[in-house]
Image (tube, helix red, strand yellow):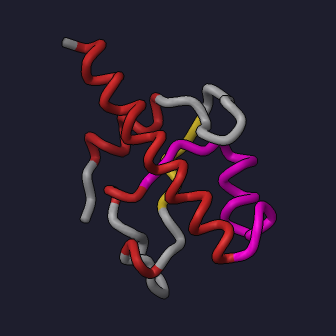
Amino acid sequence: MRNHKRLAAIRKLPCIRCGNPHSQAAHSNSAKHGKGRGIKASDEFTIPLCHSCHFQFDTFQLGNRVESEEMFDQWLVRVERMLVMEDREVF
């Protein structure tokens, strides 16, 4: 499922790993989030990662598949909190 509003909000956040203010929306690499061959996970499962951290995450340089999924799930919880705070600041 595509959600352009969420992707734009994610890109405004700093990298969840290193804090770099220039982030991109990184999709989950997990099948449990809808990832498949040639299929991106739903935009619901995106986090802000800078180019370097995104590359390291996607190439499993930060851990094996299980460790990466655990990391992503923890980051996703933090990102959801950050997005809620962003919404509160807007209103």
Vertical arrangement, residue 65 with respect to residue 87, above or below: below
Among the 4 quarters of the image, the one containing residue 10:
top left
Vertical arrangement, residue 7 with respect to residue 31, above or below: above
Vertical arrangement, residue 13 with respect to residue 66, above or below: above
Chain part drawn in magenta:
46-64
Q: Residue at x 64, y 76 (%)?
A: 66
- Give coordinates of residue 86: x percent, y percent: 34, 22
81 within the magenta span: no
- Give coordinates of residue 20: x percent, y percent: 68, 30
Q: Quadrant of the N terminus?
A: bottom left
Q: Is residue 8 left or right of residue 28?
A: left
Q: Is residue 7 left or right of residue 50?
A: left
Q: Nearer the viewer, residue 88 or 6?
A: 88
Vertical arrangement, residue 10 with respect to residue 39, above or below: above
Q: Residue at x 74, y 69 (%)?
A: 60
- Give coordinates of residue 5: x percent, y percent: 26, 40
Furthest residue toward bottom: 37
- Give coordinates of residue 67: x percent, y percent: 68, 69
Q: Nearer the viewer, residue 49 or 71?
A: 71
Among the 4 quarters of the image, the one containing residue 81:
top left
Q: Nearer the viewer, residue 46 or 69?
A: 69
51 within the magenta span: yes
Q: Residue at x 74, y 75 (%)?
A: 64
Q: Nearer the viewer, residue 4 or 48?
A: 48
Q: Quadrant of the C terminus?
A: top left
Q: Residue at x 25, y 18 (%)?
A: 88
Furthest residue toward left: 91
Furthest residue toward right: 61
